Image (tube, rainbow, N blue to C red):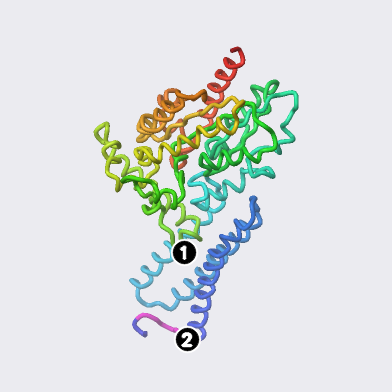
Amino acid sequence: MNVLFTKLTKSGLTKIVIFYMLGVIFVLLSFESTHWIFSEFGFYWYKYFFRGLLIAAVFFFVLMGFWQLNKVIKSELAKNTLTVFHSIFVTFLLVELVIMIIPYSIGGSNTLVGKSWYHLYWEKNALGFRDPEPEKIYDHSKKNLVILGDSFAAGQGIKDPENRFVNLLRTRFNNDFNVFCVSKLGANTPEAISFLKVFPYSPDVVILAHTPNDIQRVVSKDRISALKGDTLNVSKIPMPKPATHYFTEHAFSINLFSFILFLKKQRDQYARSAQGGQGLEIFFQNKANRYNYLGYYLEPELIDLHLSNIISLRTLYPETKLIVLLFPNLNEITIDYSDRNVNQSIIKALAATDIASINLTPLISFLPEKQRIVNKYNFHPSEAIHKMVADTLGTFLTLQKKE
């Protein structure tokens, strides 16, 4: 001990231990407060302020412990090592504080910053949709236009809902339609249809905003195991997910960087498999690689079930004008693949029905990827895409009115 320390008294040691123990306690308190922040829907600044105070307390106690310890250390090497360690830890705390207070639309509910963004910018009505209460929109003298879908229609990543295509259509057809957004994050096709069944107003026009991942959960585990042939048992192949452990669930910074690393690995995998033009087709021919929803479209039984869900809208609403709005994947690597294997398959199936389809791929594929998406970590449509979609739908609906 005498080699490392000088003048180390019992009271001095006690102070050092107390300061570091308090630092550990307040770190754990700050981590545990993370779930409290999201315990109720809405963005409450006082919760973030309280967690910030806990982090500030960690700063204080750790620096006080460092100051006390540094006074009694003899070895310069030990002092330098201690300084480096504390610098790294303090940097982590600063990064944690900054990332916590800046809501960023990335990863939806898979990231803590994404949850913060959602709680700050998402206002839901009593039915759970990002829209005013239906009775505030409804005018009995107008027809009802309902837009079904998931986060693409709901406007994930769009701070002001007035800039999403739903609201742009509402403004354009203010004299003709009551435009309702009946869409929720993560909804697949059967779920979207179930929203319509409980909606208080009967639709005259339904626009189903379809994205390639709508085929996920197309059947239950029991039903998929009952499918005949050598069909992929999706229920037994886990979807790749970001790493999950205590720190990724409680620390904003670690959670964010873990998710970014996951996205990079996923993108690199796609990039490697897509080399050579038809690479993704070759990649998904191997059933072991069909854990991704894009691979589901190569399973005849699965795509038939998915298409039957879409076409079931006609049975449920025989007098309603039905339009399927087909989004491709918006990232550069899979946009063409998703058009060839998803959108074109659906267009072909709908050709035998009276359900109209609009393929958005030719409209948006010429734009650079960074202009199509919210940001480099959020592959939802940008405001520019929402405007283009609104213009396309507006032209289509105007022509329909003239017929």
- Check disc 2 and report the residue beneath it: 9
The spot of residue 240 in percent (x, y) is 38, 51
Q: Main secondary structure of the magenta part?
A: loop
Label 1: state its secondary structure. Answer: helix
Identify the residue at the far top of this view.
Answer: 402
Residue type marked 1? Tyr
9 within the magenta span = yes
Report the mark closest to the observer, 1 or 2: 1
Mark 1–mark 2 Cα distance, whole angstroms, equals 37 Å
The spot of residue 308 in percent (x, y) is 47, 35
The quarter of the displayed image where residue 352 is located: top left
Q: Which mark is residue 288?
A: none
Q: Which residues are magenta?
A: 4-10
Quadrant for the C terminus, please.
Answer: top right
In-image side of 368 versus 111 (left or right): left
Q: Note whether residue 157 is visible.
A: no
**Circle 1: is it few (<14), some (14-19), or many (20+) Cα within 10 Å?**
few
- Check disc 1 and report the residue beneath it: 246
Foreground pick, 154 / 1:
154
The quarter of the displayed image where residue 128 is located: top right
Compared with 251, 269 (above or below) is: above
First in sequence, mark 1 or 2: give its number. Answer: 2
The spot of residue 141 in percent (x, y) is 75, 23
Picture residue at 42% right of the left edge, 23% below the top: 362
47 within the magenta span = no
In-image side of 71 versus 314 (left or right): left
Foreground pick, 17 / 146:
146
